[in-house]
Image (cartoon, grey):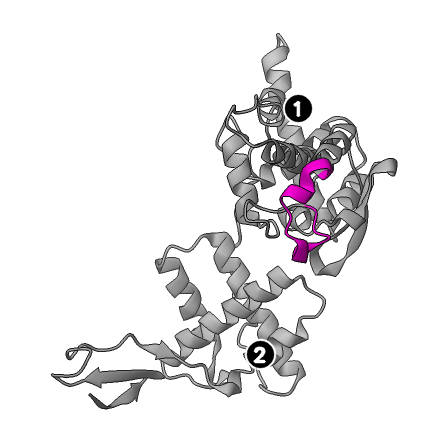
C-alpha cells in the first residue's frame, strides 16, 4: 500500500513500500501548475487568435510554468530575466528548432504582457531578452514538372474514387489559391462560390478574406462534391473535406496526402510558397500577393521577392552567354 510521499520542486512523489501493487517503484511524477500562473485566464483572453494559435500559446506557457516549478519558482512574480534566459538555453540544449524556441519565447512574452496589464506582476522579465530568430529559410519552390507530377499523378488502380477526387481538390486549392493548411481544413461547403470562382476563408487572427479559386480547382471541387456524401459523416454536415474516418480533415491528413502524391520530398506549405513565388515571377503586384496570402504585414510577403530575385539571377547565369 502507499503510505505517503513528499513534494519536491512542485512534484508529488508517491513512494510505494514493498508488498504494494507497484512493488516499490516510484510512480511517474506529475506536475500541477498552481493557480497563481492564471494560465486558463490567459488562454481565455486570446479571443482574436485562431484556436490552433491559442492551443500553441497555452501549451508553451504551461511548459514554461512547469519548468519553473521544477526549480521551485511557483509564482510568476519570482521569474526574472535570468530565468527566461536559462529557459531558452535549456530549450537549445534539448535541440529544439530555432523557430520553435522563437515561438515559445513569443508566447511567454505575450503572457507576461497580459499579466502586467492585469496587475498580476509588476515587472516584465522578458524585456531585453534576445531571442534566437528563425533563419528565414522557405521551403523549396516546386518547379512545373514537380507540380504536374503531384497534381496530375496517375490514379492507383486500388484507390477509391472518392479519395482521388478529394485529394485532387485539396492539392489544386492549396496551389491554386495559396491557402494555409489550417485554412484549407476549415473550409465549408457554404464558404464556396464556385459559380464565381471564389471562396471565403478564415485566416490567422480570425480574419476573413475572399480568395479566387483557379479553374482546375473549381473542376476538382465539383467532382469531389459529387461524392462527398459518401465520406463526410452526418454530424459534420458543412465541412468541405474529411479524412477516411469521415471526420474533419486535419493538417496531419494533408501531409499524408502530399507525401502520397508528390514525386519529391516536400511539405504542404511548399504549395503556398510556390503559389506566391510564381505570382511574383509572373509580374503580380506585391500588395496583391499580400492580400491573397492573408499577410497582415507586407514585410512577410517580401520574403518571396527575395526568392524570386534568386530565381531570376539563376536563370540569368544559366542562360546568358556572358553571365
- Residue 97 to residue 71: above or below: above
Count of number-bearing discs: 2
Q: Which of 200 and 167 is in front in this view?
A: 167
- Residue 157 to residue 170: above or below: above
Q: Which residue is drawn at 53% across and 30% down?
A: 159
Is residue 111 within the magenta segment? Answer: no
Mark 1 neighbour density, 10 Å: few (under 14) some (14–19) many (20 or more): few
Is residue 232 within the magenta segment? Answer: yes
Q: Is mark 2 on a helix, strand or loop?
A: helix
Q: Is mark 1 on a helix, strand or loop?
A: helix
Whether residue 132 can be seen here: no
Q: Residue at x 54, y 37 (%)?
A: 257
- Residue 131 to residue 245: above or below: below
Disc 2 and disc 1 in contact, CB within 8 angstroms = no
Query: Quadrant of the image for the N terminus?
Result: bottom left
Q: x and y percent of residue 247 in the render?
A: 59, 52
Query: Quadrant of the image for the C terminus?
Result: top right
Mark 2 neighbour density, 10 Å: few (under 14) some (14–19) many (20 or more): few
Q: x and y percent of residue 178 in the render?
A: 70, 39
Which span of residues is magenta-colored? 225-240
Amino acid at each position: 500500500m502507499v503510505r505517503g510521499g513528499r513534494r519536491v520542486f512542485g512534484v508529488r512523489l508517491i513512494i510505494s513500500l514493498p508488498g504494494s501493487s507497484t512493488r516499490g517503484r516510484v510512480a511517474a511524477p506529475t506536475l500541477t501548475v498552481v493557480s497563481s500562473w492564471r494560465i486558463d485566464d490567459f488562454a481565455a483572453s486570446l479571443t482574436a487568435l485562431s484556436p490552433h494559435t491559442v492551443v500553441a500559446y497555452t501549451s508553451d506557457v504551461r511548459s514554461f510554468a512547469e519548468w519553473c516549478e521544477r526549480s521551485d519558482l511557483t509564482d510568476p512574480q519570482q521569474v526574472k530575466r535570468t530565468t527566461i534566459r536559462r529557459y531558452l538555453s535549456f530549450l537549445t540544449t534539448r535541440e529544439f528548432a530555432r523557430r520553435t524556441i522563437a515561438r515559445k519565447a513569443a508566447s511567454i512574452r505575450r503572457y507576461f504582457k497580459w499579466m502586467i496589464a492585469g496587475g498580476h506582476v509588476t515587472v516584465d522579465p522578458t524585456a531585453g531578452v534576445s531571442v534566437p530568430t528563425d533563419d528565414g529559410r522557405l521551403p523549396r519552390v516546386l518547379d512545373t514538372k514537380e507540380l504536374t507530377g503531384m497534381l496530375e499523378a496517375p490514379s492507383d488502380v486500388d484507390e477509391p474514387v472518392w479519395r482521388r477526387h478529394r485529394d485532387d481538390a485539396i492539392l489544386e486549392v492549396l496551389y491554386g489559391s495559396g491557402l494555409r493548411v489550417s485554412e484549407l481544413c476549415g473550409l465549408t461547403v457554404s464558404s464556396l462560390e464556385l459559380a464565381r470562382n471564389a471562396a471565403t476563408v478564415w485566416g490567422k487572427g480570425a480574419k476573413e478574406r475572399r480568395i479566387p479559386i483557379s479553374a482546375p480547382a473549381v473542376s476538382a471541387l465539383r467532382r469531389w462534391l459529387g461524392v462527398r456524401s459518401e465520406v463526410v459523416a452526418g454530424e459534420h454536415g458543412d465541412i468541405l473535406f474529411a479524412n477516411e474516418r469521415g471526420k474533419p480533415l486535419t493538417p496531419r491528413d494533408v501531409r499524408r496526402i502530399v507525401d502520397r502524391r508528390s514525386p519529391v520530398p516536400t511539405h504542404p506549405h511548399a504549395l503556398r510558397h510556390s503559389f506566391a513565388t510564381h505570382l511574383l515571377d509572373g509580374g503580380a503586384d506585391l500588395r496583391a500577393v499580400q492580400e491573397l496570402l492573408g499577410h497582415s504585414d507586407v514585410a512577410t510577403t517580401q520574403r518571396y521577392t527575395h526568392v524570386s530575385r534568386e530565381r531570376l539571377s539563376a536563370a540569368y547565369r544559366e542562360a546568358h552567354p556572358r553571365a
